[in-house]
Image: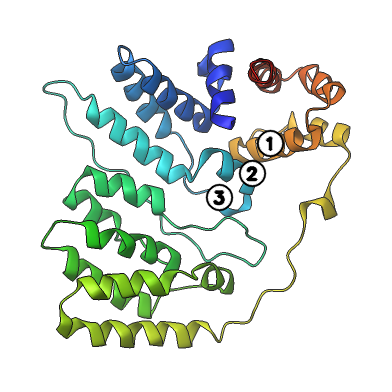
Amino acid sequence: MWLCLIVLFAQIADYNELPPLWKTRALLAMARQDPEKAPQYSKLAYETAREIDLSVEFKDYPFALKAFGQPEAIVAEAWFSHQKFRGPGEAALPFPERPKSSPARCEHRVLDSAEKYLRVAFDAGPDTFASATLALRSPLEIGSALDLLPTWDDARAVPLGMELIRRLRGAISSRREFEAAKDLSSKVQRFASFAPAEDREKIEEEFEYYKSRNQAIEPCGAAVSLSDKEEPFGEKLRKVIRLTSEFEFTEQLLQLYQMADGDQSRLDELEASGDPRVRALIRAFRTEAAKR
């Protein structure tokens, strides 16, 4: 739903007024919808995506991540789209690097898996995929890469997988990530069945060491509910329209929409806020709702 709203936002307002995260998503969607202008939109999407701040601790923005996806994956998608429409004689651009993630804290509900980023790299070719695995840190991220290897028709699949298994042994994890990586065992087993028989015992040893090391991490306490710290609607709106950080604004605005829950008086309050970003998005929201 949010992607539809962002595209409508771009059509209702000047998409150049959108924050880079929103603008990139809108341009990629517009490129898919309009094949004739797809090269132009794709190039602009990639140029815009390069403005996205990848140093932000994205795990602190669960609503924004759910709506838009991991920012490094958006940059990778923009790169892939631009490469697809690259003109004759136009130099190939390097695949965007993904910063090494930090361990998740207990309060994080959105974790770094690198799944979509790795999928784009995988589709781009073996050299790109091999390079994209270098910054993987956590068991979730390593699991995302291992999951792709059995479908990779390349001689480097097994050596790269064994390197990932060795890295898994010493993976920097957190209790939150360890608990979220419940399907890692099946991914490791799937890779082991794909690997030569002589490597399987080593794979099992490394995985057992990883489990024993991470099971000792202190468990998390009870999760904090957003409702426990919910502010009054009007007060939250006043704070939101003063925000300049793209991710903080996106996160808080999406929370406001959830609080509004279709209440027309609250939507009126949002539209009358005086912030052009909020006003245009509310118009998009109402346009989309009227179609149903």
Residue 254, disc = 1
Circle 2 residue: 63
Residue found at x 83% / y 27%: 263
Between marks 2 and 3, how big is the CA–CA gap? Answer: 10 Å
Residue 216, disc = none
User: Dot 3: what SS?
Assistant: helix
Quadrant, the C terminus: top right
Q: Is residue 13 visible?
A: no
* Vertical placement of residue 245 versus 156, above or below: above
Q: Is residue 156 visible?
A: yes
* Vertical placement of residue 161 versus 234, above or below: below
Task: Say how many tags the image has.
Answer: 3
Circle 3 residue: 58
Q: Residues within 10 Å of mark 2 (few under 14, many from 20)?
A: many
Q: Amino acid at mark 3?
A: Phe
Q: Nearer the viewer, residue 36 or 93?
A: 36
Residue 271 drawn at (x, y percent): 77, 18
